[in-house]
Amino acid sequence: MTVLQGPLADRDAWSAIGNCPIEKTMAVIGTKSAMLILREAYYGTTRFDDFARRVGITKAATSARLTELVDAGLLTRRPYREPGQRVRDEYVLTDAGTELMPVVWSMFEWGRRHLAGDSRLRLTHLNCGADASVEIRCAQGHLVPPDELGVEIKRKGTAPTAK
């Protein structure tokens, strides 16, 4: 269990509604199609029709999700033109979109371990071939298991506390 620290420890004295980073993130990526579009962008998909086909959603839904992800700063539009065609946009991950990928890979790992299906898929380190995983480490480099994870309010202009 994650430990709430300081003023957060009194669960009845505060509400996370509207202020929680999880809630705010889910408002941006909380649909299946948004997550799958991000997955496809990470795999190199850039074209509108390819997103629609690979994610299996309508063109209207593809347009809505791509617009939301661009507005959220996770994708950016880049114009391109095929010979003899009109100018169109392709969609590429921004730095913020790339930084979100550990969340996607955590979902991949959880689904691989806990849901029925083909569990032969693995995340691997391309340089050595070993299995790769997503983990939480502190700024000192220590692996942080769930029962050693805390949440605290950081005051503006102060460094996090070391323990």
Image (cartoon, rainbow, N blue to C red):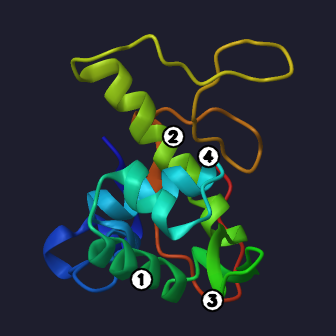
Q: Position of residue 154 (x, y in %)?
A: 56, 77
Q: Which residue is mark 3?
A: 156
The answer to whether residue 64 is above or below residue 125 is below
Q: Nearer the viewer, mark 3 or mark 2?
A: 2
Measure the C-alpha gap from mark 3 to mark 2.
31 Å
Q: Is residue 151 visible?
A: no
- Element class at badge 4: loop
* Extreme residue toward the front, this view: 84
Specify few, some or many for label 4: CA neighbours under 10 Å numbering under 14, 14-19, or 20 or more.
Answer: few
**In this rendering, would 31 be left or right of 158?**
left
The residue drawn where x is 32% and y is 29% is 111
Measure the C-alpha gap from mark 1 to mark 4.
19 Å
Q: State yes or no: discs 3 and 1 in contact (Cβ < 8 Å).
A: no
Q: Which residue is mark 2?
A: 105
Q: In what quadrant of the picture does the N terminus appear?
A: top left
- Element class at badge 2: helix
Q: Which residue is mark 4?
A: 43
